[in-house]
Amino acid sequence: MSRLQVVSGKGGTGKTTVAAALALALATEGKRTLLVEVEGRQGIAQLFETEALPYEERKIAVAPGGGEVFALAIDPELALLDYLQMFYKLGGAGRALKKLGAIDFATTIAPGLRDVLLTGKACEAVRRKDRSGRFVYDYVVMDAPPTGRITRFLNVNDEVAGLAKIGPIHNQAQAVMRVLKSPETSVHLVTLLEEMPVQETADGIAELRAARLPVGRVIVNMVRPEVLDAADLELVRTVERSSVAQALSAAGLGGARRGGNAEKLVDPLLEQAAEYAERYTLEQEQRAVLGELGLPLHELPLLAEGIDLAGLYELATELRKQGLS
Amino acid sequence: MSPDPAEASETAEGPEKGRRLSPARVLDVDPLLDDPKTRIVVCCGAGGVGKTTTAAALGLRAAERGRKVVVLTIDPAKRLAQSMGIDSLDNVPRRVKGTEGDGELHAMMLDMKRTFDEVVEAHADPERAAAILANPFYQSLSAGFAGTQEYMAMEKLGQLRARDEWDLIVVDTPPSRSALDFLDAPKRLGSFLDGRLIRLLTAPAKLGGRAGMAFLNVGMSMMTGTLGKLLGGQLLKDVQTFVAAMDTTFGGFRTRADATYKLLQAPGTAFLVVAAPERDALREAAYFVERLAAEDMPLMGLVLNRVHGSGAGRLSAERALAAAENLEEPRIVDQGNGKAGLRNSPDTYGSSQSPASETAAIASEEGSPADTERSVDRLTAGLLRLHADRMQLLSREQRTRDRFTARHPEVAVVEVPALPGDVHDLAGLRDIGERLATGRPDPT
């Protein structure tokens, strides 16, 4: 199991939720994981129902069996200041630079610089060891940018190619690439069983592969329960309306005769089944497309009441059951 | 004025009607689309709520009601572009064929790089334009800076409006997490490019003469030194030449962003907020509504997409589930293939269903091949469970919507039913337009 787990996905597929559930799953049985946020949205804080995360590693959850999940919201400006302090010993001048807007300026005109700072921080956490020489975190899970930008985000070498050819940023990019292209890293993509997210997933995987970045698994999120199976749907097309009316009546829903309460339910219920069937077919098609990607596929159920802390633990358990941790 | 007794008794019959917190107004899109004074309709909302489809459907409807319309889409799905009969939309408005009536529908897709290039070409002499277009900083700026897409969407809108060729422009907004980005990003980018720092960096020579700025010069040299080490001298130089070149031809980014922004406040512009009945999307919509009010921008209403309904709204989720269990219960024991066991119905609610199970028992004793009956029962139980899911979804959507309505009772709302599949053709778009215009009848 790779120690750096990068989670990406099309916007709206729930990649932050999956990343958080994965961090919980990996922490189970006494492990320690770090969940990293790079886009400054405070999505992790919302999920774990805590206040906004500062730029420091902070424990946000415990996992079954005594594990711990830490979280970090990386702020690229502060990360850059750290760097400058480390390499140029700026002292108070660093604050002056920030005040003048130079830090914001630098990370804005050079998006590559921003990305290398973000990935750099995550890679540093992966490699960090304590005094006894053990890794501080067993796993680092990154809630990464969406599929459309993930390859560029991770391929920092190319990104900083236009920047200074020497100096700490350049060295940093080299070090980051060594981690990201190694088996230590695994990039997972979250999708839904819908046409657009599936298409984007396929495109994203092709790009990641072309950039020689290690693609991990595809996680299908928010999968609806199978209420009717293929055999049921076959029967829906041929079933006699009157026999459905009789069954409804037998279940205590009124009269089966024309105009009876049970009889009046038949049409709307069959119509709902037809809608279900249409979606079922679309979902099966998308499953088939995903199956051709040649990657391990995992499915997480749709939680009807939306995601809360309990739901997050539920998803983490599901991920463990499916062998993701 | 007195309430119709028949109406009252119907309300009593359908419990879901009483529960419903109706919006103050139902949004009526037709008068808005027909009004010759409406010149721009902006569809905004968080990503993934069907903004582009809504924009296209509104455009088609307006065109078929006789107006000459252009729809500016930002990032349409291939399917949607094809539904307008255009395989690849580009930066030029193309006439959509197959519309009915006297109006015209044109569609285009924003190409932000191309639009930026055009702005440069329109404002600089060929030589200078070529220099700007070749500048590496310009290239990364126009290809995908945070905010460039929004900035260029506004720019394009301004251009279309200035040409005055269309009666109505329908604009889709870029897919961003926050609907507010459409309003904020252009200004942010504009101020950045016009900002104090970029000026200081790019024109340090001008400052030399002013004695009071001497301390700044020390700061400047440290800053350019540090930035140079980080970014490389070349990038800074590129930025410098780019800003200088743009300045002389273009007259400042912020001024330009401000001018387009004003267009959004002008009479004739209408905003439609698009959302789905989900917590996050509606929270985003509420932010946007509040922001529009603060900016004096005219909000026409909320389009609530993908709302579910049911033709059997009177059968509650609870009753449907109980009935499903009734159908499955007596037969679990004798069902050989174990299918029923999979349909987790571990709980029985005991006495409440006894009269029903009696009928079920009687029914099962009557003739007909037991197998067929069993599979019909199984199917019917499935239909009832499907219905229970639907009713639970309905009530969740209702609660979410009510939260919005309670906070913003002044906002007119139109609900558009969820479609099981994608839109494939003009007929599909027309159908959505129809639903947009008529609103959803109550699910009774």
Image: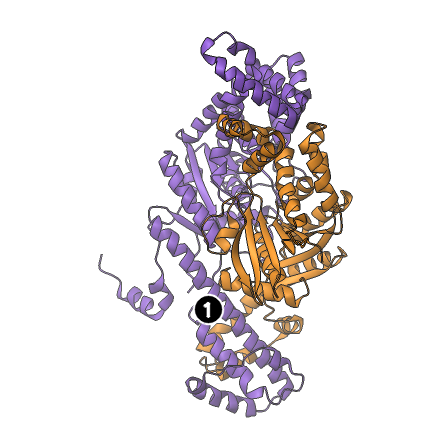
Chain colours: A orange, B purple
- Examine the rendering and report whether any part of residue A279 can be seen: no
Residue B303 position, x and y percent, is 45, 47
Say if A23 sits above or below A243 in the image: above
Q: Residue tagged by mark 1? A: B312
Q: Which image quarter is the C terminus of chain A in?
A: bottom right
Residue count near mark 1 (Cα–Cα under 10 Å), binned few <14, some 14–19, many ≥20? some
User: Dividing the picture into quarters, in which one does residue A224 lie?
Assistant: bottom right
- In percent of the image, x 55 and y 17: which residue is there? B250
Residue furthest to the front in view is A132
Residue B275 position, x and y percent, is 47, 48
Q: Which image quarter is the N terminus of chain A in?
A: bottom right
Q: Amino acid at mark 1?
A: Ala
Q: Nearer the viewer, residue B68 or A215?
A: A215
Query: What is the number of callouts on the image?
Result: 1
Instruction: Determine whether the residue tagged by mark 1 lies in a helix, strand or loop.
Output: loop
Q: Chain of mark 1?
A: B
Q: Nearer the viewer, residue B301 or B208?
A: B208
Q: Nearer the viewer, residue B290 or B25?
A: B290
- Examine the rendering and report whether any part of residue B343 can be seen: yes
Residue furthest to the left in view is B2
Residue A223 position, x and y percent, is 60, 62
B172 lies left or right of A292: left
- In percent of the image, x 71 and y 46: which residue is there? A203
Residue B32 position, x and y percent, is 41, 39
Say if A281 sits above or below A154 in the image: below
